Image (spheres, grey):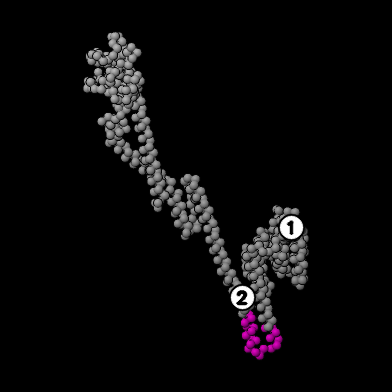
Amino acid sequence: MRGSIRTRLLASFLLVAVAAAAGLSVYFLDQIESFGLRRLDERVRSEASVAAATLGATLDSSGGTALTGTSASHVTAALTNATSRSTSRMLVLDVNGKVVADSADSAVGDNYRARAEIARALKGRSGTSTGATADRRVSLSVAEPVRSGGKVVGVAYASASTFSVLTLLADYRGQLAAVVLAFLLASFVLTELLSRWLTRPLHELQAGASALASDPSVRVRPAGPRETRELANAFNELAEEIETSALELHDEERRKSRFVSDVSHELRSPLTGIRLAAETLLDGDVEPDDQRRFLATIIREADRLTGLANDLLELQRIEGATGELPIGRVDLTQAAHLAVEANEPVAAERGVTVTVVGTAPDVLGSRDRIQQVVGNLVDNATRHTPAGRGVTVELTTEDGDAVLRVLDEGPGIPAMDLANLFERFYRAQYSRDRASGGAGLGLSIVRAIVTSHHGTIEATNRPEGGAAFTVRLPKLDA
């Protein structure tokens, strides 16, 4: 069945309404007919009993012992007296089943002995039978034995008819047709309104789903029954996920585009330097000192390319890690000391002292990666700290996290650079020189490592001067 839900609901409601109305109608008409028959049976049985008792009393008072031979006028008078207020047809039969009196004067002389109810009454028991008349009414006949002198001497036979379902349908077919038509029309209108009300939320969902293809921000209003409200909420959750995924995909595409552009820009400068130096050497007639200088330029720029490639591969390995790194309990205090010791020669060459103060709780992660974070931050701090000043690595615990801060005494970070400091290839205003600022991937690598350890990193300026890089990692309980 391919119809819409509203059409199916409409057809279903109409079918149920018609079936229920038909079933109830048949049931109540049958009950009405049964009630009429019960009332008729009570009346006819009472009349037959009264007639039998009256005839028996009459025979007893007159000294008769049988209806046979009794004058018809005598019996008829007794019958008339017994059924003066009766609306039923009354017959009196003798012991042979022959009609000796009839309130309708049409069956006198007929023999009814073959009828089951008559045969039963002649045996001294009450007999009853039902049937249908020519005009499709229900007829009811009751035969009661007439006793005289303790013996059955005849039968008082009463019969009457009442309406039936068929007679009702025949007599009121015009009215019934009008009622049925009005019922169907009312049912159609009500089911149409009900189906529209029930399917309205589904139509809204359908419209929302169609619009979602072109506009991920589309949402629908939960309404209607509980099931449709739950469906609308599920749709909104799905739309939220789609919108979030679309935004993330858009941002990812934008980052990839910018990444390709930045890589191309970073590669262009060293490649250009290498090419110019190589072309100059190929031209010949170059002084030995110039030759050494050009060769040194080629080596330096080649090292820059190697460093850039290594940084890019390192960043890709960190961001694309799938759990292959060894993870375990890491002593953050020890990792900080080891990283500072590894950077001491470079710091000493720059005339900067590095000090570790405090302790921090253990964290879960890779010791090599965490040492790399500390090392990169210390290297970045010593790079921008003037000679003769110092860098402090501060370890502590705050709000249930292990905290590591690298504090320098440099010029600080311009406010315009704070928001983008951890982006790839971004170099702050105070480190635009590639000779000192690198390719702008060091802090991106630091953020990637910290994020992979479910931590956060933040860069701020210290009130007393200099920059502060704060790393927060979830601590491990002892």
Task: Name the residue nearer the viewer: 169 or 374.
Answer: 169
The residue positioned 36% from the left and 43% from the top of the image is 188
Amino acid type, label 1: Asp
Q: CA distance from mark 2 to mark 1?
A: 40 Å
Amino acid type, label 2: Leu
Q: Is residue 36 above or below residue 392?
A: above
- Residue 28 visible from this viewpoint: yes
The main secondary structure of the magenta stretch is helix
The residue positioned 43% from the left and 51% from the top of the image is 203
Query: Residue 451 at x, y = what percent?
Result: 65, 61
Task: Give the magenta part as a residue range.
Answer: 273-294
Instruction: Kindly state the secondary structure of the residue where label 2 is placed.
Output: helix
Query: Residue 60 at x, y = what percent?
Result: 31, 10
Which quadrant is home to the C terminus? bottom right
Task: Name the residue nearer the viewer: 284 or 69.
Answer: 69
Residue 276 shown in magenta? yes
Image depth: mark 2 or mark 1 in front = 1
Query: Residue 170 at x, y = what percent?
Result: 28, 34
Q: Which residue is mark 1?
A: 362
The image's mark for residue 267 is: 2
